[in-house]
Amino acid sequence: MTTEAKAKQLVHYIPTIEGKKWVTRNSKNHGGIHRQEEFRKGIKMLEHCAHHFRNPRLFHLCFTGADLEIYQLVMHRFCRVLTAEGIDYRYKAAREEDSEKGHHFHVMIVLGCEKQTHRFITSTNEEGKHEDVSALRKAIIHTWNECQTLKCRVNPPRSMSGKTAFLQFNQSNMEMFHEAADWMSYIYKSRSKPASGTVYFSGRPTRKI
């Protein structure tokens, strides 16, 4: 195979396997992968975004202070704006429960666009008029009409040392792609998963506006 042919190879996930199961550095610290098939669906999503999105950026959102219906409502409102703006996106989410956060909702969402993404998601606590904040923040403010205790934190990747709120990957950089996959594996960890009910969720645009 020529050097040029190698350079054109698209990224793909190469799992670390222990005892016939996929493991990640991140999940090992939290009891391992909860459901192997769900993690593999998440990897397929990342591969799709790497191969087809323009400048794919992975963000980690954590919603607290509400129930599943509210978490799904705020994501619906946020994604409706992304669709209207022509932003490529896909996300995977997981419902969790623990003594510290109660019933909470992790979302790993990939945005793909030619422009900067800070007007859709930022890692700062935005103040001022509603028109001056991100689309995510506007969706949260809107949803306070149904639940005033709703909160959301944008968790930046530790590997970026606070430089950005996201991990940007692409179709050719295997190292960054695997970094994104390891980060995303956090929502598939065994720790804090509820014993019953639907645990995993996903979303993508249903139509173009």
Image (cartoon, helix red, strand yellow):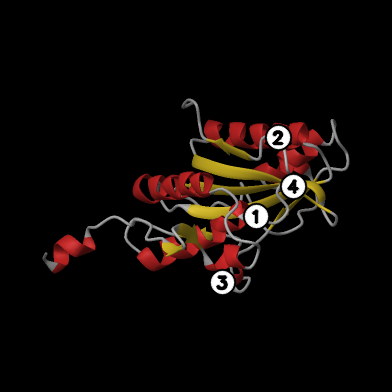
Q: Residues within 10 Å of mark 1 (few under 14, many from 20)?
A: some
Q: Residue 111 carries which label?
A: none
Residue 159 — which label? 3
Q: Name the residue under label 4.
A: 63
Instruction: Determine which residue is flagged by label 1.
Output: 190
Q: What residue type is labelled 2?
A: Gly
Dot 4: within a 10 Å radius of its alpha carbon, few (fewer than 14), some, or many (20 or more) residues?
A: many
Residue 164 makes an appearance in the image: no
Instruction: Kindly identify which numbered label has been placed on residue 197.
Output: 2
Mark 2–mark 3 distance (CA, rounded to whole Å): 33 Å
- State which tag comes first along the sequence, 2 or 4: 4
Contact (CB < 8 A) between labels 2 and 3?
Answer: no
- Callout 2 secondary element: loop
Residue 8: image quadrant is: bottom left
Q: Which of marks 2 and 1 is nearer the N terminus?
A: 1
SS category of the residue bearing label 4: strand
Q: Which amino acid does label 3 sit on?
A: Ser
The N terminus sits in image quarter: bottom left
Looking at the rendered image, the disc whose residue lies closer to the viewer, 2 or 3, is 2
Of labels 3 and 4, earlier in sequence is 4
Q: Residue type at mark 4?
A: Phe
Q: Are the residues at dot 2 and dot 1 in contact (C-beta closer than 8 Å)?
A: no
- Element assignment for label 3: helix
Outermost residue, right side: 148
* Amino acid type at mark 1: Ser
Viewer-closest of 202 and 49? 202
What residue is at 70 percent from the left and 34 percent from the top? 197
Viewer can see residue 93 = yes
Q: Tell me which residue sits at (55%, 51%) in the image.
A: 117
Q: How far apart are marks 2 and 4 (CA)?
A: 18 Å
User: Which of the 4 image quarters holds residue 93?
Assistant: top right
